Image: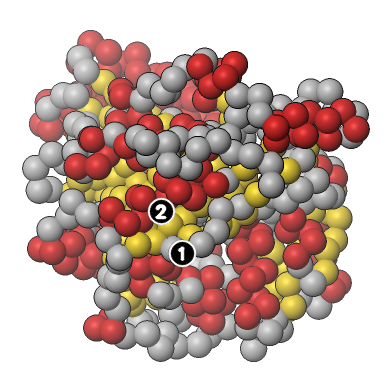
Amino acid sequence: MIKKILIANRGEIAVRIAKACHEMNMTSVAVYSEADKYSLHVRVADEAYHIGNSAASESYLDGDKIIELAKNIGADAIHPGYGFLSENSAFIKKCETAEIIFIGPSSKSVEMMGNKTTARTIMKQNKVPIVPGSTEGIKSYDDAKNICLEIGLPVMLKAASGGGGKGMRKIDKIEELKDAIDRAKNEAKKAFGDDSVYIEKFVENPKHIEVQILADKHGNYLHLFERDCSIQRRHQKVVEEAPAFTLTDELRAKVTTAAVNAAKACNYYNAGTIEFLFDQKESFYFLEMNTRLQVEHPVTEMITGIDLVKEQIKIAQGDKLTIKQEDLKIIGHAIECRIYAEDVDANFAPSTGKILHHRLPSGPGIRVDRGIDIHSDVSVYYDPMLSKVITYGKDREEAISRMKRALAEYQIVGVITNIHAFQWILNNPIFLEGSFDINFLDNKFINLLPGKWKTEIVDEFENVAIILAALLKDKDSKTKPFKRECSPNNKWGKNTYE
Ligand code: MV4
């Protein structure tokens, strides 16, 4: 039985994992870098250890240092969260050697799914639909040309060791192919140390829908339905929801079955996600498998009532899944908005600084998973995601209205955030009717009231924040005015300092 878990991560996910440890009466151990001295994850854990400089390579990515620390402090397990070491099969092997439980899949599963051509081959063998194209790296220009002629243009050229949109290019004309292969191979070699590239048919204007699965070490598999993650910008998800309300029950049954088959195909255990592209008709295709807990896992927790992190921990210590597929039902609807420290008006430039004020939304159907609190520093070293607002309702409409209210209540002073920009999405008819696809934000997003609220709002609270900033000698303290309109009749009015 696991007694003490080292959390090899930071921010909101480290906080989230600590909460699961505490509910299970396990000791939570935080690790932190120089830049994270005042971070929330350090304060909420039972123990915290400084592991190095601010650069991730000298702290959160230093697997050897983290394993050594785990041994020294008597941690039986390491939870990697997402990003950093979570999908690093060499690190998982080192944990296995050091006899520390890695709260995640086997190194073998990660390796198999990390190579995208291997993953495609395995999926094809197991009748999980893949995007038409090659299941091996292309061998020559002629080989590539033949594949293109067979499946038809446009195509996507992708790096076998890539993923998440890295090392990917679209080819519209056959004349572009030769040059594109050379460049793609060069880039892939530099980025991943592997120049293998493959070809897929380009899927036009798809939705990105992914299925959450759970599997134990005894061969039991479950799915926890799907999430729609189409609302994204430059491969950064912005809004996610569960379920994907545009799916028919028939398609839902098909895609969840495909996802369970995908997990079985790589002898998977742990929580995992199978990503699919849904085209404009009724077809879906396997894209990638994420062999870790994901940022957007809370929306699934809300509609199923399952705590995914606790399930991960139980699976890692060898427990059998006690949940039965037939007991799982979708109840209600959940939406997540990712709060980033970025300036939407300055081409989404990251914003850094000290958090001077943080007032969370609350009330019915609201959950906030956060990595910041007052006094936290938001630095340039890591991902700019500050927190996630998750709302739950009996149906999608209620989840959306609660999200509008929650974001109107949410106040952060010290860094510029994207909080105000969500109201545009949440009121957009394309979002509301469900006809959006992965290109929605790139094609359609226009910031409402550009510039207007910049000059309009210097309210009582902002003055307080400015004085605070001056007292803290932080001349560059930044803030965006708080959202004031979450309904056409400005129900919530002006934000004032209570
Ligand atoms: C595609 C595609 C269209 N056709 N593959 C981007 C991330 C990586 N996981 C795969 N990606 C895509 N692969 C084919 N054959 C479009 C994308 C894509 C995308 C996919 C999911 C979510 C957002 C996206 C944004 C741009 C492109």
x and y percentages locating residue 352 in the rendered image: 71, 31
Element under label 2?
Answer: helix
**Crowding near the residue tagged with mark 2, few <14, some 14–19, many ≥20 C-alpha atoms within 10 Å:** many
The reply to whether residue 438 is in sight is no
Q: Answer with left or right where residue 360 lies relative to residue 208.
A: right
Position of residue 237 relative to residue 185, above or below, is below
x and y percentages locating residue 141 in the rendered image: 27, 22
Q: What residue sits 43% from the left and 57% below the top?
A: 391
Which of the 4 quarters of the picture holds residue 349? top right
Q: What residue sits 21% from the left and 68% below the top?
A: 257
> What residue does disc 2 label?
402
Quadrant containing the N terminus in the rendered view: bottom right
Q: What residue sits 22% from the left and 28% below the top?
A: 155
Q: Answer with left or right where residue 286 lies relative to residue 351.
A: left
Dot placed on the residue nearer the N-terminal end, 1 or 2: 1
Please state which of residues 431 and 173 is positioned toward the viewer in this rendering.
431
Q: Are marks 1 and 2 in contact (CB under 8 Å)?
A: yes
Find residue 364 and name its label.
1
Element under label 1?
Answer: loop
Which of the 4 quarters of the picture holds residue 80? bottom right
Q: What residue sits 46% from the left and 56% below the top?
A: 390
Find residue 144 and name its label.
none
x and y percentages locating residue 454 in the rendered image: 58, 19
